[in-house]
Image (tube, helix red, strand yellow):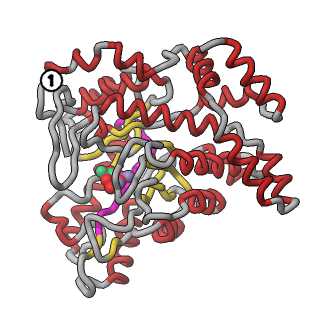
């Protein structure tokens, strides 16, 4: 990247009233957690295509995640899914992470792959099965304690397939009861992030079907419970940015699962289908960050950015790098929005002026900026190329085929 491209960029942004040094600082501070399961084999309900070199255990998943962090500099933590990442000794797993310059992040309970859960887990009408589900959540809290993680990230697959199959209200009551027990077991530094999704695996109703249901549950539980927005978990056309803004304003937005969708819960590479949506999400976050209300500001600051991605056909490590780079790029663009200019246009009810002030930032090429940021962070200016040239993909081939999969 030529110095002149960067100088031109700085000049341009300074003229627009943007403090580039501040933008750089924000870009260096961003942290995006990658999911352990994104490194394993995954697929659709039709087929899991096995790839060569896929990690055979959680330790190797961390080895791969470490590559992503080494090259991008912004992915220092890895989310675990239990029991997919169950090990005998979590201290050992944490030490392995530390040796790779990583920490262990959100603990994701799995309440959907046990035969007992055919009619649900925390909402099941059978108290013995509800008990089992609560015990699993408590086990996850214990694991979080051991590995020094402060986030329990719950996605609940519960629901029904047919009208009348179970009492929707009854299930709602059971959920509040079971989650209350879970909530009470949290340490004071822990957060329970509640994720919603409108369908699948249940097809008639889902017990946490949308953000309002997750919000209501989080509100009833208390301050340590917040909503997690998985960007792929909305019906076609949903305005995800509005949900983000609303939850921020209520100080109930806890985190994200970034991915992209075209049709369903596709778990595609972040920003691959709709980068503008990602940009607009960051716009709402930055707007909340600049709010005079301290609580809203802090909520925006404490958002846990996580990727939830599954790779059916693409090589996993570069796909994850691509997602991380796309997040960084859209965040960089959003940081170029002149919020004062937007506000001034809003005050004049200048529709086109306001829209322009937002979109204009999206249209800048932030490549020179990101190159300088990476240079200063001591990571390769082109992490993808660096990965492809590193020989790492060859080095993991001896792992063979048939590694970890869900
Ligand atoms: C779900 C949801 C969860 C993730 C699982 C694998 O659809 O997005 O967050 O843990 O998939
Ligand atoms: Mn998710
Ligand atoms: Mn999902």
Span of residues in magenta: 147-158
Quadrant (top left/top right/bottom left/bottom right) for the N terminus: top right
Residue 318 rendering spot, x and y as whole percentages? 35, 28
Q: Quadrant of residue 308?
A: top left
Q: Nearer the viewer, residue 39 or 337?
A: 337
Q: Report the residue at 51% width, 44% height from top.
A: 304
Give the total number of marks visible in the rendering.
Answer: 1
| Residue 106 visible in this rendered orientation of the protein | no
Residue 157 rendering spot, x and y as whole percentages? 29, 63
Q: Quadrant of residue 234?
A: bottom left
Residue 305 rendering spot, x and y as whole percentages? 50, 43
Judged left or right of residue 348, residue 324 is left
Q: Nearer the viewer, residue 383 or 350?
A: 350
Judged left or right of residue 315, residue 33 is right
Position of residue 93 relative to residue 120, above or below, is: above
Position of residue 26 relative to residue 295, above or below, is: above
Q: Report the residue at 26% width, 20% height from top.
A: 393
Residue with the mark numbered 1: 399
Q: Nearer the viewer, residue 183 or 362?
A: 362
Q: Callout 1 environment at 10 Å: few (<14), some (14 to 19), or many (20+)?
A: some
Q: Nearer the viewer, residue 103 or 315?
A: 315
Residue 155 painted magenta: yes
SS for callout 1: helix
| Residue 371 visible in this rendered orientation of the protein | yes
Q: Report the residue at 49% width, 15% height from top.
A: 380
As drawn, the residue found furthest toward the bottom would be 164
Judged left or right of residue 269, residue 326 is right
Residue 52 painted magenta: no
Q: Report the residue at 24% width, 33% height from top.
A: 58
Residue 148 rendering spot, x and y as whole percentages? 41, 36
Judged left or right of residue 230, residue 347 is right
Image region (quadrant) for ligand 3: bottom left
């Amino acid at each position: 990247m030529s110095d002149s491209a960067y100088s031109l960029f700085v000049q341009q942004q300074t003229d627009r009233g943007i403090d580039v040094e501040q933008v750089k600082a924000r870009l260096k501070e961003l942290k995006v957690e990658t999911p352990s399961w994104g490194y394993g084999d995954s697929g659709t309900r039709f087929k899991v295509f096995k790839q060569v070199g896929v990690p055979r255990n959680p330790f190797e998943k961390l080895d791969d995640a470490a590559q992503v962090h080494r090259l991008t500099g912004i992915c220092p933590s890895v989310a675990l899914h239990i029991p997919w990442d169950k090990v005998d000794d979590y201290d050992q797993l944490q030490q392995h992470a530390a040796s790779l310059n990583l920490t262990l992040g959100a603990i994701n309970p799995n309440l959907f792959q046990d035969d007992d859960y055919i009619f649900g887990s925390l909402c099941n009408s059978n108290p013995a099965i509800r008990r089992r589900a609560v015990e699993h959540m408590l086990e996850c809290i214990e694991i979080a304690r051991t590995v020094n993680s402060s986030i329990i990230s719950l996605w609940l697959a519960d629901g029904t397939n047919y009208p009348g199959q179970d009492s929707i209200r009854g299930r709602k009551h059971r959920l509040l009861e079971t989650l209350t027990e879970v909530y009470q077991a949290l340490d004071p530094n822990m957060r329970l992030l509640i994720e919603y999704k409108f369908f699948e695996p249940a097809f008639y109703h889902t017990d946490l079907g949308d953000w309002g249901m997750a919000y209501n549950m989080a509100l009833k539980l208390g301050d340590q419970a917040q909503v997690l927005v998985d960007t792929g978990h909305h019906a076609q056309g949903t305005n995800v940015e509005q949900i983000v803004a609303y939850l921020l304003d209520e100080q109930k937005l806890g985190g994200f699962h970034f991915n992209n969708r075209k049709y369903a819960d596709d778990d595609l590479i972040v920003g691959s289908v709709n980068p503008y949506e990602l940009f607009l999400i960051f716009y709402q976050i930055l707007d909340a960050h600049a709010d005079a209300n301290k609580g809203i500001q802090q909520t925006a600051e404490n958002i846990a950015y996580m990727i939830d991605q599954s790779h059916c056909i693409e090589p996993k490590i570069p796909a994850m790098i691509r997602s991380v780079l796309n997040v960084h790029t859209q965040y960089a663009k959003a940081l170029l929005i002149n919020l004062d200019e937007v506000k001034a246009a809003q005050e004049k009810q200048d529709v086109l002026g306001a829209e322009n002030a937002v979109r204009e930032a999206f249209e800048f090429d932030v490549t020179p900026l990101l190159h300088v940021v990476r240079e200063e962070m001591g990571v390769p200016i082109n992490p993808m190329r660096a990965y492809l040239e590193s020989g790492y993909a060859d080095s993991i081939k001896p792992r063979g085929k048939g590694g970890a999969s869900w």
